[in-house]
Image (cartoon, helix red, strand yellow):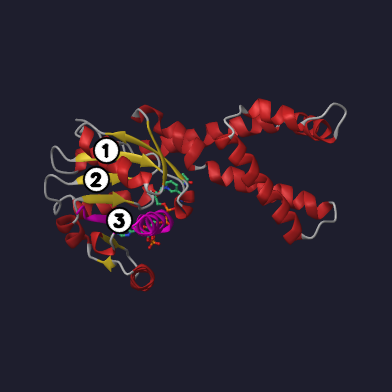
């Protein structure tokens, strides 16, 4: 039995707890900390999982999953650093925060694994990228991979790629939702009722995603198959290119990567 404590049960913390339960993990193996009593009560009631104080979490859990906002990390580290026994595995879901931040603040030799998941974890379709810190051994990475595999797909990446991964798959769902929202608006402009437009677009997104994943096709080939000579699609694609949508997406993802780097820098500590 591996006891897992989620520190900060907001959107991602809840998604992980819910996903692990759906994947068959016993509620007795899971616990969480949370600042607001009403939120804690609601989660404990919904999932049948124990809400614990931080001191109890660091003592009892084998794996501590840090799921607070990067901006909230300092007070959390101040709180856990004096209480955490050696030998725990710390798993950080926080955008931008490097494993060395935890290694500097927690007892010498603490194993840290940095993870960038995404919200489709809620439906068992997360994309999570994992990277081990200086003291993370193969068995730590294997354990984190096993946990996250129950709520989606897992990739191992060098930590130096985590800021880029954060921009691509961590933030990625938001960009797809933005696109879907804009396409539904187009349906409204063309006189299709909102519910109907949403059905048409969401199923098209699901179908396109299934073809990308299961059909094994390259996106360019799949797009070409939709684009008939003198047909409708090419007229639409010309507008997308005219408006620079490709460049806008590349810029958006680069800006998200830069913000992830910035979030990490905000916690840099002087080495001297
Ligand atoms: N949302 C996303 O799509 C993704 C988020 N992430 C990362 O996951 C982390 C969590 O993000 P998200 O779930 O969206 O954020 P949320 O704000 O929804 O969740 C963070 C939770 O932590 C609580 N919290 C803050 N400090 C403490 C503390 N000291 N002790 C206990 N609980 C605390 C917050 O409480 P309160 O509400 O009181 O502040 C809140 O409930 C972030 O670091 C983010 O970078 C990673 C991938 C995707
Ligand atoms: O916007 C954010 O900072 C978080 C990290 C990746 C997705 N959401």
Foreground: disc 2 or disc 1: 1
Question: Is 142 inside the magenta-drawn segment?
Answer: no
For image coordinates 85% across by 51% down, the residue present is 190
Between disc 3 and disc 2, whose residue precedes? 3
Badge 2 residue CB within 8 Å of ligand 1: no
- Residue 3 appearing in the image: yes
Quarter the N terminus occupies: bottom left
Between disc 1 and disc 3, whose residue precedes? 3
- Residue 243 appearing in the image: no
Which residue is outermost to the right? 230
Q: Which residue is denoted by mark 1 in the rendering?
A: 142
Foreground: disc 1 or disc 3: 1
Q: Which residue is denoted by mark 2 in the rendering?
A: 90
- Give the distance between the C-alpha atoms of the residues marked 3 and 2, in whole angstroms: 10 Å
Quarter the C terminus occupies: top left
Which residue is outermost to the front? 215
């Amino acid at each position: 039995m591996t006891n897992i404590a989620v520190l900060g049960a907001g959107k991602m913390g809840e998604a992980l707890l819910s996903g692990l339960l759906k994947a068959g993990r016993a509620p007795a193996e899971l616990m969480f900390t949370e600042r607001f009593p009403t939120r804690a009560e609601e989660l404990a009631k919904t999932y049948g999982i124990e809400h614990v104080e931080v001191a109890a979490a660091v003592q009892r859990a084998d794996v501590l999953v840090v799921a607070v906002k990067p901006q909230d990390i300092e007070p959390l580290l101040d709180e856990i650093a004096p209480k955490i026994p050696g030998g725990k595995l710390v798993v950080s879901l926080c955008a931008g925060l490097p494993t060395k931040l935890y290694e500097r603040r927690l007892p010498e030799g603490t194993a840290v694994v940095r993870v960038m998941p995404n919200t489709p974890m809620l439906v068992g379709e997360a994309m999570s990228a994992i990277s081990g810190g200086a003291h993370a051994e193969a068995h730590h990475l294997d354990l984190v991979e096993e946990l996250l595999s129950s709520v989606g797909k897992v990739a191992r990446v060098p930590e130096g790629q985590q800021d880029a991964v954060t921009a691509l798959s961590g933030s990625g769902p938001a960009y797809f939702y933005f696109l879907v929202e804009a396409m539904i608006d187009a349906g409204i402009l063309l006189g299709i009722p909102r519910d109907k437009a949403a059905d048409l677009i969401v199923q098209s997104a699901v179908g396109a995603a299934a073809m990308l994943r299961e059909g094994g096709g390259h996106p360019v080939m799949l797009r070409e198959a939709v684009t008939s000579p003198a047909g409708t699609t090419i007229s639409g694609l010309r507008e997308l290119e005219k408006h620079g949508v490709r460049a806008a997406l590349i810029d958006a993802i680069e800006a998200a990567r830069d913000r992830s780097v910035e979030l990490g820098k905000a916690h840099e500590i002087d080495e001297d």
